[in-house]
Image: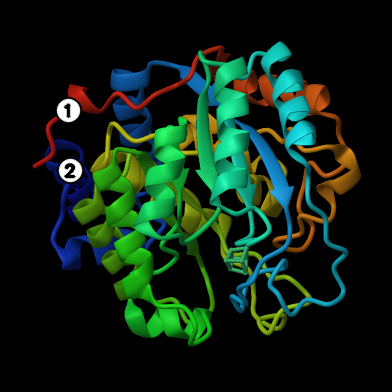
């Protein structure tokens, strides 16, 4: 057995590696197939061939922040902005429920228009009508009090990617008004409140180094999130990073496999960004260890305006078309979509 194969075996058995071992498998493509096979096996042990679907509702593209990589950042004056009303959001859930979705994800920029009372009103309305569904929020950094209000109103899960766990790199990606300390504190607060918490990072973001990726994996180990979302960084023309190259499919898939082996229980999406850099990116993501897909339930009229990065896919299809298309893609990859909330099966493994 080669040295690299031994490292993959060790990761599969122990769910952890030393920094130099992680660097060795991150910096080569030689063990990508072995990694993907091991990750696929680990996912099958815990989740079988089930793939969970999350109905994504991109309800506002207003944001008070100015992250250098993001297409809906505050200073992008080229973008036409929109907000969905509570009624419009509920109508997306109605469509989604009919199509078999049992998780709705409300995602938006950090938009003060939706204050805590408004958010809680929307959460209550959705959970009253669909008590058998999970509701996930992805609306950025808030105070402990706000998070607690959303949780008490019935929200089940919260996604907040840390993006990079290196403070110097965080500063290169975000303006002074934002800090890694606050991002981490938000994530710890979400966990302590009881949310199923999701974090993750961009792969191939400007200035990223292998050592930062190792820091990302170490931070995830500390946080132990139920959901881990990673996707390639993709350049947006109306951002300060317009001249940087996008991240690679290869490294993203490698990291999905490594993350599956480190966190066997985790809910890991094959992201839209992955499908945007390669036509079969999401299928490859599933084969590399992912077990979640997130079709879009937002009204087609606003889809193009939720422009996080250039050439984003799935901006023209109705919800039913997206659902049907993904059903086929998942089947072709050897898995099947299930109608279920798709909660984490965390108790079935012990982390070392
Ligand atoms: S990444 Fe999030 S917080 Fe940053 S500008 Fe974009 S939507 Fe706003």
Residues at circles 1 and 2 in contact by the CB criterion of under 8 Å: yes
Q: Is residue 35 visible?
A: no
Name the secondary structure under disc 2.
loop
Q: Residues within 10 Å of mark 2 (few under 14, many from 20)?
A: many
Q: Which mark is residue 91?
A: none
- Give whichever of 128, 22 is nearer the camera: 128
Q: Nearer the viewer, mark 1 or mark 2?
A: 1
Q: Compare marks 1 and 2 and give the one earlier in the sequence.
A: 2
Question: Is residue 253 positioned above or below 290 on the image?
Answer: below
Residue 321: x, y in percent? 82, 25
Residue identified by numbered label 1: 349
In this rendering, the count of numbered labels is 2
Q: Is residue 16 left or right of residue 40?
A: left
Q: Quadrant of residue 64?
A: bottom right
Q: Which quadrant, please, contains the C terminus?
A: top left
Question: Is residue 55 positioned above or below 328 on the image?
Answer: below
Residue identified by numbered label 2: 15
Q: Residue at x 69, y 25 (%)?
A: 93
The residue furthest front is: 117
Name the secondary structure under disc 1.
loop
State the CA–CA distance, disc 1 to disc 2: 10 Å
The quarter of the image that holds ligand 1 is bottom right
Q: Residue at x 68, y 49 (%)?
A: 278
Residue 50: x, y in percent? 47, 17
- Give whichever of 151, 92 is nearer the camera: 151
């Amino acid at each position: 057995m080669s040295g690299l194969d031994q490292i993959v075996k060790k990761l599969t058995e122990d769910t952890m590696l030393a920094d130099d071992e992680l660097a060795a498998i991150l910096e080569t493509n030689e063990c990508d197939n072995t990694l993907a096979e091991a990750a696929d096996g680990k996912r099958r042990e815990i989740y079988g061939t089930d793939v969970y679907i999350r109905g994504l509702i991109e309800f506002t593209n207003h944001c008070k922040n100015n992250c250098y990589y993001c297409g809906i950042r505050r200073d992008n004056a080229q973008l036409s902005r929109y907000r969905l009303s509570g009624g419009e959001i509920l109508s997306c859930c109605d469509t989604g429920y009919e199509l078999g979705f049992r998780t709705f994800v409300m995602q938006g920029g950090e938009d003060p228009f939706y204050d805590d009372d408004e958010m809680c009103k929307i959460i209550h309305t959705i959970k009253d009508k669909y008590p058998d569904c999970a509701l996930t929020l992805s609306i950025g950094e808030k105070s402990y009090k706000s998070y607690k209000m959303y949780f008490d109103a019935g929200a089940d899960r919260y996604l907040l990617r840390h993006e990079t766990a290196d403070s110097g790199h965080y500063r290169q990606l975000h303006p002074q008004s934002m800090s890694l300390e606050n991002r981490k504190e938000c994530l710890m607060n979400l966990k302590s409140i009881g949310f199923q918490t999701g974090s993750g990072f961009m792969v191939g973001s400007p200035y990223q180094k292998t050592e930062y990726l190792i820091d990302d994996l170490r931070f995830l180990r500390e946080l132990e999130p139920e959901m881990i979302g990673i996707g390639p960084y993709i350049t947006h023309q109306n951002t300060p990073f317009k001249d940087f190259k996008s991240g690679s499919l290869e490294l993203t898939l490698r990291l999905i496999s490594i993350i599956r082996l480190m966190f066997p229980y985790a809910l890991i999406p094959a992201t839209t960004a992955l499908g945007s850099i390669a036509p079969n990116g999401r299928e490859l993501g599933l084969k590399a260890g992912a077990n979640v897909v997130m079709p879009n339930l937002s009204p087609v009229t606003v889809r193009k305006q939720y422009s996080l990065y250039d050439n984003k896919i799935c901006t023209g299809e109705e919800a039913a078309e997206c659902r049907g298309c993904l059903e086929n893609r998942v089947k072709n990859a050897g898995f099947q979509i299930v109608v279920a909330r798709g909660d984490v099966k965390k108790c079935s493994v012990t982390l070392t």
